[in-house]
Amino acid sequence: MKVLILGGSHRDIPLIETLKKKGFFVITLANANYYIGHKFANKYYNIDFNDLKSVKEIIKKEKIDYLIAGCGEESFYNTALLANEFSLGNYDEMEAVEIIHNKWKFKEFCLKNSISVPKGSDSYKGLEFPIIIKPQNLSGGKGVNVVYDEKELKTSINFAKKFSNNLVFEEFIDGEIIAYSAILKNQKVVYDFVAKDIPYLNPYLISTAHSYEIDKNIKNDIKNDTEKIAKILQLKNGPFHAQILLKDNKYYFMDVTRRIAGDLFPYLIEYADNVNYSEMVVNSYMGMDFEVNKGDKKYAVRHCVMPKKNGIYEGIECKVDYKLRLDLVKKNELIKDYTKVHTGIFILVFNKYDEMLNTARKINDLIYAKVKD
């Protein structure tokens, strides 16, 4: 049987590998020959997955059995749209997709249903500085900026509009960022995982994530709100990933998605909890049943290596044992904008929580990129 993934970057590797282990013929589709994920697939097409006419032709030509969403907002939207049209998967109705994957519509939904989110609007008027500006339909920190007074507004708005004309304005809350990854089944959370998200050289780009223990009551409230969202929107079985802000024992939903998180985050979950996360995701997308299979709990760090300057890339220095390594940049390549580049991804696994935390705190000194002028 054939599966088509709208994607093919390194972020899609966990899904590609899982599908191949299950015996599927995996085809990736993205107009980027350099995507590492293509090498893991059985076949790939160098076609823009926003070109829906061409994608539909591939679906018919290859006689695709299932569509799988890659790790990206546009990928998920297009996959849900086509899967609903061709009956090639188990995805939310488009009305729910529009709400979940549009930052302003989701904020409106949360405010209407008493779910905690930062105060915001589709305009900066009526908000108190500092204000954070975000494109409505993008992830990964693209176009995001914090503005501290009216003098900075015009420049920041123009910067954000390079990525999208549709913007969201929020009152900026300087708190702790966590990732909440859940698996939904019949609108109930049957599995969840919490990680701490840590930026490094770019405040809007997460570099390191690790297993994280938060107050049980707060975690339970987040779970209840997730199930509330799922019930109101009648969400289908599958992944629910949220970025949440914690401050003063309060939590605020910032962004949510029905796709996997990026930069091999599924492997972080699987190594930490010894759980069949990627299998649950692909089974749910295909409308197949699944169970949560967990083994002995451990603690893990996912570290994306960033260079500290522009220049000629020489490689990665690693001074600690790791379970997984994926290099993303070749030696002698020119780094042009170091604040947006990940040169490699590492996953480290620990038996003790404190040992993991101590390593995570100094991870940029233990694993780092070497660059020469």
Image (cartoon, rainbow, N blue to C red):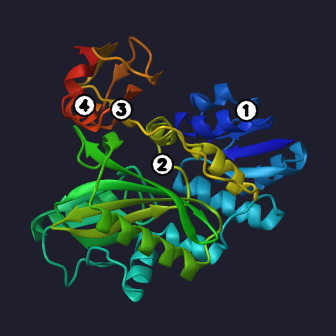
Alpha carbon of mark 3 to alpha carbon of mark 4: how far?
19 Å
| Alpha carbons under labels 3 and 1: distance apart | 26 Å
Q: At 60% from the left edge and 53% from the top edge, which residue is drawn? A: 75
- Mark 2 and mark 1 lie on one chain; the one further toward the N terminus is 1
Task: Give percent across and percent down for residue 151.
Answer: 10, 66
Residue at disc 1, secondary structure:
helix
Using residue 19 as the reference point, say whether residue 249 is left or right of it. Answer: left
> Dot 3: what SS?
strand
Which residue is labeled 2 in the image?
Answer: 261
What element does badge 2 sit on? loop
Q: Quadrant of residue 16?
A: top right
Check disc 2: other Cα within 10 Å, few if <14, some if 14-19, many if 20+. Answer: many
For label 4, the residue is 355
Query: Label 3 amino acid?
Result: Cys
How many other residues sit within 10 Å of disc 4, few (<14), some (14-19) or many (≥20)?
few
Q: Are marks 3 and 2 in contact (CB under 8 Å)?
A: no
Q: Amino acid at mark 4?
A: Glu
Residue drawn at the location 26% of the way across and 16% of the way down: 371
Is 21 on the left-hand or right-hand side of 50? right
Residue 318 position within the rendered picture, expressed as x and y whole percent measured from the top left: 31, 15
Q: Which residue is mark 1?
A: 21
Q: Quadrant of residue 14?
A: top right
Label 3 – label 2 distance at C-alpha = 13 Å
Distance of label 2 from label 4 (alpha carbons): 25 Å
Give the number of the mark in front: 3 or 1: 1
Asked if one can make out residue 263 in the rendered structure from this viewpoint, the answer is no
Residue beneath disc 3: 304
Which label sits in the foreground, 3 or 4? 4
Does residue 41 appear to the left or right of 177 in the view shown? right
